[in-house]
Amino acid sequence: MMETKVSQQYNQMASVYDRRWSGYILNTLLFLKNWAQIPPSATVLDVGCGTGEFEKIVLAENPTQHMVGVDISQKMLAIAQNKCHEYTNVSFQTASVLQLPFADDSFDVIVSASAFHYFDAPDAALTEMKRVLKPDGCVVILDWCRDYFLCQVCDILLKIFDPAYKQCYSQAEFHNLLAAAGFEIRRASKVRFGIVWGMMIATATPQPK
Ligand SMILES: C[S@@+](CC[C@H](N)C(=O)[O-])C[C@H]1O[C@@H](n2cnc3c(N)ncnc32)[C@H](O)[C@@H]1O
């Protein structure tokens, strides 16, 4: 199963992840924080939270923000836990996006950064996120965008050489996935990081029942 390969890969990489990707992590997560404009009172779920860098960035501004991070890599989570151990309002759990261990309608905001291209079943992942999201909540997803040339090249190469990699999507495909899972897109953009690397972000809310 793909998730086993992903967790193995990130367990192996965990101790060097922050150092190896420091520039990318800081740029993308600051962008996500500024884009998301998370209300201070919101309860936030971070899917594929990795080493807890997003939590650290948010907590630096609002130390009382209620946040839960989930990831399938226990070693990434151990680092996240260590970084945020002083905060009783923040917790981390080992869980897959396909089976979130939370009741329906639990979160005001769900974020996910640079993880969507690993998800085995993106349609089921979005449906599961919608289940745990409050009806007036929103998801904010940031990920690689295949509309950019370098992402297209990486997509081809990673599919061949990286057993953990699933695929990245064009913005149109991503929006179709969101719509099919019952989300309405409120705000969306494509964004370049550096000269060549391209990502996309969307804020979406559950369609009214
Ligand atoms: C590139 S890292 C991004 C980490 C963090 N969001 C950041 O921006 O620094 C991708 C993370 O997604 C996690 N991940 C991949 N597939 C997942 C799944 N199905 N459920 C939960 N987490 C997953 C990986 O274990 C990894 O920690």
Image (tube, rainbow, N blue to C red):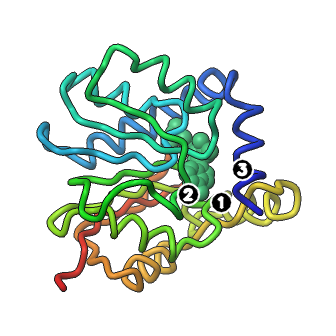
Is residue 11 toward the left or the right of residue 45 in the image?
A: right
Q: Is residue 209 above or below residue 38?
A: below
> Under 8 Å from ligand 1: the CB of mark 3?
yes
**Mark 2: which secondary structure?**
strand
Q: Which residue is mark 2?
A: 144
* Labels 1 and 2 touching (C-beta < 8 A): yes
**Mark 1: which secondary structure?**
helix
Q: Nearer the viewer, residue 138 or 88?
A: 88
Quadrant in which the C terminus appears: bottom left
Q: Is residue 79 above or below residue 86?
A: below
Q: Which mark is residue 6?
A: 3
x then y, percent, for residue 62: 19, 26
Q: Amino acid at mark 1?
A: Cys
* Labels 2 and 3 touching (C-beta < 8 A): no
Marks 2 and 3, the one that precedes in the sequence: 3
* Gap between marks 2 and 3 measured at Cα: 17 Å
Q: Residues within 10 Å of mark 1 (few under 14, many from 20)?
A: many
Q: Is residue 73 above or below residue 79?
A: below
- Foreground mark, 1 or 2? 2
Is residue 163 toward the left or the right of residue 112 in the image?
A: right
Q: Which residue is mark 1?
A: 151
Q: Which mark is residue 28?
A: none
